[in-house]
Amino acid sequence: MRKFNHLQKVLIGWIIGIAIFGCVMIGLRQNALSDMGYSAWTYIQYGLFEYPLTSIGNFVNDVANLWHQYDDNQYLTQELAEQKSYKTLYDNERNENKELQDLLNMKNELGNSTQISARVIKRSSSSWDQYVTISAGSAQGVKENMIVVTSEGAVGLVQDTQTNTSKVQLLTDEDLENDISVKISMEDGSTAEGLIDSYDPDKKAYRMSLFDSSVDVSAGMEVATSGKGGNYPSGIYIGTVRSVEQNDNSIVSTIYVTPVSNISSFNYVIVLGNGKVSE
């Protein structure tokens, strides 16, 4: 067998090494090209198909979510509005029930007088402080110049009657058709009598003058009907003295009386007159 010398062995080793290295490099290059081709196709596929479809799907989902959220908000808004409406109805019912109960209690305290229950059926915004129409008329026994009261006190006088309705002039009308005979309860138990003849919208008070100008009247004293004028009984609460102002002649003073608190808003009334309680 032929033996290789040292130089030949070295050359053969180099040739084998170079061959192995070449094979390895060729294999790596083929893998790299394959990977590059795969990566390029993947990017093209993702950019042209997958990403647009995914974006459209996400957009559709976002729109659907927003639509559902809008529907939920609309539903909640409607629910909130209905709750407020229910609360308003509840408050109105509660206030009307209290008003009716207070009137019922008042009827038991009025004694021997004509009492006709009614409700307000008309109150125009253009004449809010002047007139109301009530659901009782001549057929129920209502007569002109009877006094109309709420659970807190007097609010008006009957001006005109129809068969089943009546027109009431409120005491807050600046031009009262009829004066109201009243009395002030003094601290010593006596009374000072006078007339309420008009209403001052600036002071939001009735104007009252005394028959006896020497009487010392002070704020806070109660004013009620005297029963000496009109077709209504004595002792119906009108209001409280607000202030006393001396007129220019320094003899006669004007007394301002604060009305009952609910005169601007009421739904039920009692019409009072002299005589027996109506059945």
Image (cartoon, rainbow, N blue to C red):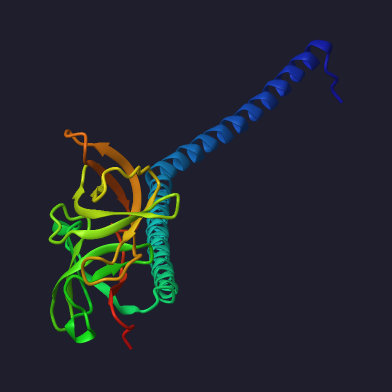
Q: Is residue 133 above or below residue 129?
A: below
Q: Quadrant of residue 166?
A: bottom left
Lateral position of residue 177 relative to residue 212, left or right: left
Lateral position of residue 166 relative to residue 218, left or right: left
Q: Position of residue 99 (x, y in %)?
A: 40, 68
Q: Position of residue 153 (x, y in %)?
A: 34, 63
Residue farthest top in this picture: 7
Q: Quadrant of residue 72?
A: bottom left
Q: Is residue 215 above or below residue 279?
A: above
* Quarter containing the C terminus: bottom left
Residue at 31% from the left image edge and 64% from the top image edge: 266
Q: Is residue 79 above or below residue 53?
A: below
Q: Nearer the viewer, residue 48 or 251?
A: 251
Q: Position of residue 248 (x, y in %)?
A: 17, 33
Residue at 45% from the left image edge and 42% from the top image edge: 41
**Residue 260 seen by the camera:** no
Q: Nearer the viewer, residue 44 or 9?
A: 44
Q: Nearer the viewer, residue 269 or 215?
A: 215
Q: Nearer the viewer, residue 243 or 267?
A: 243
Lateral position of residue 72 relative to residue 122, left or right: right
**Residue 232 seen by the camera:** yes
Residue at 30% from the left image edge and 40% from the top image edge: 244
Residue farthest bottom in this picture: 279
Lateral position of residue 6 relative to residue 210, left or right: right
The tally of labels here is 0
Q: Position of residue 73 (x, y in %)?
A: 40, 56
* Quarter containing the N terminus: top right
Q: Is residue 241 above or below residue 107?
A: above
Q: Quadrant of residue 19?
A: top right
